[in-house]
Amino acid sequence: MKTDDIKLLLQRYYDGETSEQEERQLKEFFASNDVPEDMQADKKMFEELMSFGEPEMPEELNARISAAIDDKAGKHRTVRLRIFGSIAAMLCIILSVNTYLSREEVTISPKDTCSTPEEAAEQTQRALIAFSKALNKGMDGMNKAEKTTNQANRIVVEKLKKLNNR
């Protein structure tokens, strides 16, 4: 890989955005003798990281971390249930109002905003697309929360490795 590519990959690594394969590429690069002078500090850091090996985690700490992860997973499930519950409630309200307004006794006659069925279908499609975008935005937030949790877990593992080597 070119040095510029390595620098970009290294920045992504520091931001916590690299995959395991990309991290292996960085380790291989820094294990070689062809590391530029301005990247020697990064090379030293990677050599230190590679020397750690697998950390030994005390059983009590492992249990506490597992409990924290389970707690986070429960909170994520709760958030998802609230989102889907809200959607279901909204659909029930819409169906109830539609049923109420479609009864013959009701004297309210809403004005048609669409002159043709095709125009109505088009407006309905736009509304569904807007709803889909809002739902996707919520899911993106959930994905970001998961990514943050993964980064926190990596930091915990790194700290444990340092503690085990003392």
Image (spheres, rainbow, N blue to C red):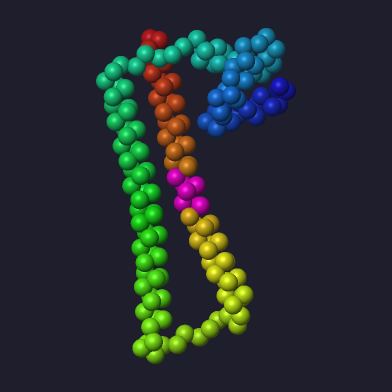
Front-most of 126 and 53?
A: 126
Q: Position of residue 3 (x, y in %)?
A: 71, 22
Asked if the magenta segment contains residue 92, the reply would be no
Residue found at the very far bottom of the displayed protein: 107
| Residue 162 seen by the camera | no
Q: Quadrant of residue 18?
A: top right
Q: In this view, does 95 lie above or below 23?
A: below
Q: Where is residue 69 in the image (x, y as percent from the top left)?
A: 34, 33
Q: Which residue is drawn at 35% across and 38% down?
A: 73
Q: Which residue is drawn at 57% across and 75% down?
A: 120
Q: Residue furthest left?
A: 60
From the viewer's perspective, is residue 106 above or below residue 72? Answer: below
Residue beneath the point at 65% across and 29% down:
8
Residue at 67% x, 14% y: name it: 35
- Determine the main secondary structure of the stretch shown in magenta: helix
First to last magenta residue range? 136-142
- Is the residue 28 above or below the residue 98 in the image? above
